[in-house]
Amino acid sequence: MLKLKCIALAVFLLQGFSVSLTAQQAHLIPIPVKAEYPQGFYSLPNRIIIAAPKSEALQATVKNLTDRLEKTAMRKVQMLWDASSQADLAQIRLILSKQANPTLGNEGYTLAVNARGIVITANKPAGLFYGVQSLLQLMPKEIEAKQTVIKQTWKVPFAQITDYPRFAWRGLMLDVARHFFNKDQVKQFIDEMVAYKYNILHFHLTDDEGWRVEIKSFPNLTKKGAWNVPKVGRFTEFSKPEPNEPRTQGGFFTKEDIQDIVSYAKGRFVNVMPEIDVPGHSMAAIASYPELSCTPEAVNYQVISGEPFIDWSHGHAVALQDNTLCPANEKVYTFLDKVFTEVAEMFPFEYIHMGGDECPKNYWEKNPQILAMMQKENLKTPQEVQAFFTRRLEKIITSKGKKMMGWDEILEGGGLPKNTAVMSWRGIAGGVQAAKDGHEVVMTPNNHVYVDLMQGDAAIEPPVYETVRLRDSYAFNPVPEGVDAKLVKGGQANLWSEQLFTYRHLQYMLFPRAWAVSEALWSPQENRNWDNFVSRVEHHFGRFDQAEKKYAPSMYDAIIQVGKNEQGQLWVELSTEVNPLSVHYSFDYSYPDNFYPAATGKVIIPKDALEMRMISYRGKEKVGRMMTISIEDLKKRLKK
């Protein structure tokens, strides 16, 4: 009898069950709608059977899972397709429900992990895909490694998860115009976004610094418009290129490249929305075809290489060179008709983004052609001129069977066609107004989701215009009070590439803020909690370490406030986004550690000090980076 009990116990353990005496922890991002984690783990056996529907839509899903198990976890995987009679033998089962669960919709799933194995159920293939992303996050962090990892056991915590998205539009914008990222890097970007359940790639393909998509009707767009002078430093402060400097920086996507990217994205349930930014941000197009401008000196224009050419000191864009397509030039509308014909053929997604943002109008205000058009069309202001252009473009885009979307400036001047969607970037005001006017809205306010902006203090972060901290991104709520939620399609994070010179830095800017935005777009508002999110972020830092991906540890670094007391003494107050941390400092040029004074309250700056150094600790563990800031800089901040 004892021998039989031992055999039964051995079989039970081989099936993958192990007992944990502690409460289960899971660190999923975004946090699920409903999740329970009973005590216990399922240990992956050496040989794993996976049962899945034989569906073309699931090929990439299954390959990603099997590759991780085989190449990283060293498991032998056998596939059973079409839920064969042997499916009950499978340790991992992917099931498409025969009777749809209305709660789950098209992208929801249930995920069960117990002593018998792992079961993911969904109404549609997209739901199974997102269920697999959650399953991978439940696995040990080593599953993210690029190389084989030798582990004694690979444990998955018991779980019962029901999950589905809050919004259908969960977007990430990638700007490949300012700095070009090639096809393989775009595919990597897609893989990294879908791991956190994003489903829209907003592809910013054209700008003043480059035209990145092949248009057969206008070959100069990529022959000339895709190339500028290599510059490294701070964007918009570069020296003006010399006439003989080689224009070797850039690149573009052929039609075959676009087809490959769109297909790759489709396999991961991502729609790709192209953006052709007009009428402003069009220097690359004008340098290629000067006849698209109303300004005669455009014949001498070149693609911008990051040198200053817009004056922002007036609170709006004032062009030093005319980077706008001419609304009074019929050649422009012929050009746009041909361009959008080819763009519509390349991108099957229902929307095309036409930009419409930051359009300087100072050249328009004195141009004879535009002044004549204003009189003819009874247009009173330059904003109405842009609105006239936008309406004509909307007719072109809808004639291709597409819907138009634009940045919130397209509301200015009035008369925006009702079926045009608005992407609100200058805060939420544009989105609120658009929804009141009956337009569909995608919320993307720059003070929350512009992940190209600094994410910590300017003393340590790569310099960009402003700061959006992780906590700011986590506070994003796409549906503000008083707005009809049915008109809010969702939201997205935007990654502009002015200051992105490498893919590693792209990752640094994107993560962890993209995790915060993903949770705002997927998870119920009531499930979100900052402290809980921080603990999950730290877990995912470990996963990124395994994957050798870059991320920003800015949430640990000091937040600096400056002031003066009644005696005229300068003081600083140091805090952090993450608590409890201590910030230690020095004024004597030495490098502080946790034995140095910790900043509590207002720290008076010594009269003769010239710089301050600071670093964050959690207990005895150094978590922040060494920050150095001059006292002169602190005084300048006080004046501001």
Image (cartoon, grey):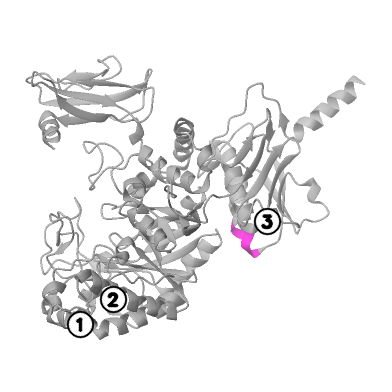
First to last magenta residue range: 56-60
Q: Does dot 1 land on a helix, a strand or a loop?
A: helix
Q: Is the magenta stretch mostly helix, strand or loop?
A: helix
Nearest the viewer among 587 and 435 is 435
- Residue pictured at 27% horizontal, 81% vertical: 332
| Residue assigned mark 1 | 373
Mark 1 residue type: Met
Q: Is residue 374 magenta?
A: no
Mark 3 = which residue? 123
The kind of residue on which mark 2 rests is Phe
Give the structural element (helix, strand or loop) at label 3.
Answer: loop
So how many labels did they put on this image? 3
Q: Name the residue under label 2.
A: 388
Mark 3 vs mark 1: in front: 1
Q: Which amino acid does label 3 sit on?
A: Asn
Q: Where is residue 83 in the image (x, y as percent from the top left)?
A: 77, 56
Residue contact between numbered discs 3 and 1, judged by CB atoms under 8 Å: no
For residue 365, what is the image quadrant? bottom left
Above or below, 593 relative to 478: above
User: Which residue shows up at 11% across the image and 61% down it?
Assistant: 240
Camera-nearest residue between 603 and 134: 603
Q: Residue 419 carries which label?
A: none
